[in-house]
Image (cartoon, rainbow, N blue to C red):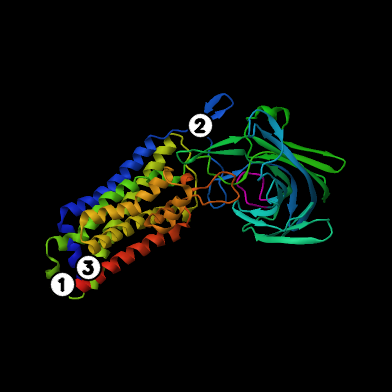
């Protein structure tokens, strides 16, 4: 009964309904505008071409999957053992002078043993490897990583039993230490097993005195020698994920493998992991949420202060003598209206903007179905909780302008200041942990991946809290604001 009365009260104020509609229209309009203003192209040698879409893994995520693979067929269970030594390579024009090509490997250069569901980029895999500066690891599924105890010389072993893949490491080829067992679901009976080498770009991060940083990438290649390979021989070679284009260095030092005296030397470049560079993240078409929040905050704050401003709160208290139910009912109506506005905005913006981008040959990074649902539903919940927060602050302070300024400063300002690098990195991270702005983490479609060479700061679009934890921070602020408003109303009764 109380909810119905509050809804009737809300919808009779045309300005409030118009404000909620404006919030949705702003999100849609700015999302479409952003999509129409984006262009993307790539270079194939000296030719400008459309950028290819990155490969996707079994869950539908865009991934990087480029490496040299020397392999053979494995049907059923089996294993591969090898000693991995002499990991070396080439780094082009590194600091400090950027004027020469030097020998060496980047920290996340990788060489080791791999089982993979075919040789297509994006096919599922598990691998045990040595790295340039991060020791021996076992990785699978493009994001899973497990480090082993350090060893002076790396003997590696990879075994398959059904859909279970186990990695081992040894310092002498006699005493073996298990790193981890992973499960690859839907792994076919016949897979490819073999040796691999890859090397991501060498990166230089230059800090900007005014805030933020610039990242410069340089081509690298790694080479590794595999000896005591058991069983050996019968190798095929696949340059997984390579394009037809070759750098000048690759033309004279091509990727691939050679075998001499039982030692297999493999050279390769690229990376295996999540792809954050090959396209535009899907949440970028929802940047209109920042502007769309403003009319929603105004409407919700006015809803929280209206009865105090016009002296109608006494009439409401006479009809409903329990103040807590007044606050809960009004907050529920504001939250529901904001949620509907958010759902409409997301349901229109996401498909429309993505279609516009695809029509312009702009690559949008693919995400899994659950991630896309989380981004869409989470954005609508963000708008809903923002409305509840603004209502609660308005009802608590009973001053519309003060409430609007306070909520805008807490919710909208921190992510804008952080992404534009106005604030120091550490301060930005703490603001996005403690303020309601933490909720914007719900929109992040590509998770932070520690094994990625590129920076993953707030300025790069990575939030310090997991998506649902960030939204929970906003929910806690909103609940606290409404509870405080109900407490004050119960004490003053006017």
Residues packed near mark 1 inside 10 Å, few (<14), some (14 to 19) or many (20 plus): some
Kind of element beneath mark 2: loop
Marks 2/3: CA distance?
54 Å
Label 3 vs 1, first from the N-terminus = 3
Q: Are marks 2 and 3 in contact (CB under 8 Å)?
A: no
**On-image quarter of the N terminus:** bottom left
Label 2 vs 3, first from the N-terminus = 3
Magenta region: 116-126
Q: How many marks?
A: 3
In the picture of the structure, the residue carrying the numbered disc 1 is: 317
User: Is residue 162 visible in this depiction of the protein?
Assistant: no
Kind of element beneath mark 3: helix
x 66%, y 45%: residue: 107
In the picture of the structure, the residue carrying the numbered disc 3 is: 3
Residues packed near mark 3 inside 10 Å, few (<14), some (14 to 19) or many (20 plus): some
Foreground residue, 121 or 438? 438
């Amino acid at each position: 009964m109380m909810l119905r009365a509050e809804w009737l009260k809300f919808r009779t104020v045309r300005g409030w309904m118009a404000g909620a509609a404006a919030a949705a229209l702003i999100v849609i309009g700015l999302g479409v505008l952003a999509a129409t203003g984006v262009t993307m192209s790539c270079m194939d040698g000296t030719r400008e071409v459309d950028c290819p879409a990155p490969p996707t893994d079994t869950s539908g995520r865009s991934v990087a999957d480029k490496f040299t693979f020397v392999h053979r067929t494995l049907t059923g269970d089996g294993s591969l053992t090898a000693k991995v030594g002499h990991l070396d390579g080439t780094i082009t024009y590194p600091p400090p002078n950027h004027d020469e090509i030097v020998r060496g490997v980047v920290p996340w250069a990788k060489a080791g043993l791999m089982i993979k569901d075919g040789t297509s980029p994006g096919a599922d895999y598990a691998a045990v490897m040595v790295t340039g500066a991060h020791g021996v690891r076992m990785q699978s599924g493009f994001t899973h990583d497990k480090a082993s105890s350090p060893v002076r010389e790396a003997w590696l072993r990879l075994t398959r039993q059904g859909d279970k893949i186990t990695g081992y490491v040894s310092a002498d080829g006699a005493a073996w230490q298990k790193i981890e067992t992973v499960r690859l679901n839907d792994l076919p009976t016949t897979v490819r097993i073999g040796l691999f080498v890859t090397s991501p770009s060498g990166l230089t991060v230059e800090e900007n005195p005014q805030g933020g940083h610039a990242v410069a990438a340089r081509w690298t290649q790694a080479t590794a020698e595999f000896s005591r390979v058991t069983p050996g021989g019968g190798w095929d070679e696949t340059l997984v994920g390579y394009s037809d284009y070759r750098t000048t260095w690759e033309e004279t030092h091509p990727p691939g493998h050679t075998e001499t005296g039982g030692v297999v030397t493999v050279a390769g470049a690229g990376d295996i992991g999540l792809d954050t560079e090959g396209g535009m993240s899907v949440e970028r078409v929802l940047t209109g949420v920042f502007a769309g929040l403003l009319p929603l905050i105004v409407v919700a704050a006015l809803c929280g202060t209206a009865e105090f401003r016009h002296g109608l709160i006494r009439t409401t208290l006479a009809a409903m003598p329990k103040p807590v139910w007044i606050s809960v009912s009004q907050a529920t109506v504001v939250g529901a209206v904001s949620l509907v506005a958010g759902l409409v905005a997301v349901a229109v913006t996401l498909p429309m903007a993505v279609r516009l981008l695809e029509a312009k040959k702009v690559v949008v990074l693919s995400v899994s179905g659950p991630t896309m649902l989380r981004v869409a539903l989470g954005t609508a919940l963000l708008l809903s909780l923002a409305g509840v927060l603004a209502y609660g602050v308005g009802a608590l302070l009973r001053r519309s302008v003060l409430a609007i300024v306070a909520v805008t400063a807490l919710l909208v300002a921190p992510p804008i200041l952080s992404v534009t690098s106005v604030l120091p990195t550490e301060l930005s991270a703490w603001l996005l942990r403690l303020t309601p702005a933490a909720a914007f983490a719900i929109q992040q479609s590509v998770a932070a991946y520690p094994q990625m060479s590129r920076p993953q700061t707030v300025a790069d679009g990575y939030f310090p809290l997991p998506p649902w934890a960030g939204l929970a921070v906003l929910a806690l602020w909103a609940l606290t604001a409404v509870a405080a408003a109900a407490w004050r109303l119960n004490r003053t009764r006017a």
